Image: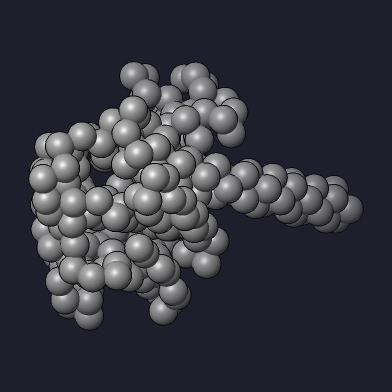
Amino acid sequence: MIAAHLQRPWLIAELIRPMRVLSWAPHRPGFVTATRIVWREVRNADLPLGFDVETWFYDDMRSHPGAVGMMTSRDIGTFTEARAEVEGIRAGCVATVGLTNGESVGRRRKWSPQDFGTINLAVAVGAALTEAAQLEAMSIAVQARTAAVMQAKIDLPTGQATGTGTDCVALACDPGDGRYAGLHTAVGEAVGAVVKAAVAKGAEDWKAWYAMAMADSAARAGAQSGTKSGR
């Protein structure tokens, strides 16, 4: 249904055919037809305060005409994938997971420029759905993402992390007459399974990376303190 490959600074998720994609992505949001969903890797330094990000990204996306485009500061080489089939309905998910920008729903933290990282998902399901059913499938994808993040047990001053402040989901399917995609359906089960698996793996990878980054930072701080005290 969907397959990813790196072309730095891009992560490209190719769909098996032109499909109707629903998202709130910064480039080509809403209901659109596309054959690929792409991530642009950025760093905070690339997007200083006051920078016209929307115009820059629109121009940068010219290299991927017709694609749905997202951005992330997470290393795109850490992407995870998952696939499932339920009663003949196939689904796939490509995810990048960064949680430094974590939030607990209903109580936001004070944002700072040091907060970066997000969860970006590209999901494809082999079912022909109405727009309303595709919206329902999107709700299942978001529910599965949240469940996987909560499973990672990341505590914040505002509560347990349920996502990040800049998450994005793009969900692709064929247009058709399928009217239902909830938790009782094969479509809902397949979508939920692949998103939960991909995000759970990505969250565990991020936790391991973050622990190493914090240990390295502490070691550097200790070395600097020792150097100063020895002067």
Q: Nearer the viewer, residue 45 or 190?
A: 190
Res 46 quadrant in image: bottom left
Q: Measured along the vertical axis of the image, is residue 23 above or below residue 141? A: below
Q: Quadrant of the C terminus?
A: bottom right
Q: Is residue 120 left or right of residue 214?
A: left
Q: Measured along the vertical axis of the image, is residue 131 above or below residue 57? A: above
Residue 147 position within the rendered picture, expressed as x and y whole percent measured from the top left:
47, 30
Residue 55 position within the rendered picture, expressed as x and y whole percent measured from the top left:
14, 65
Q: Is residue 195 left or right of residue 24?
A: right
Q: Nearer the viewer, residue 183 or 4?
A: 183
The number of callouts visible is 0
Q: Nearer the viewer, residue 188 or 108?
A: 188
Res 68 quadrant in image: bottom left
Residue 31 position within the rendered picture, expressed as x and y whole percent measured from the top left:
11, 52
Colouring chosen for the image of the structure: one colour
Q: Residue at x 78, y 51 (%)?
A: 219
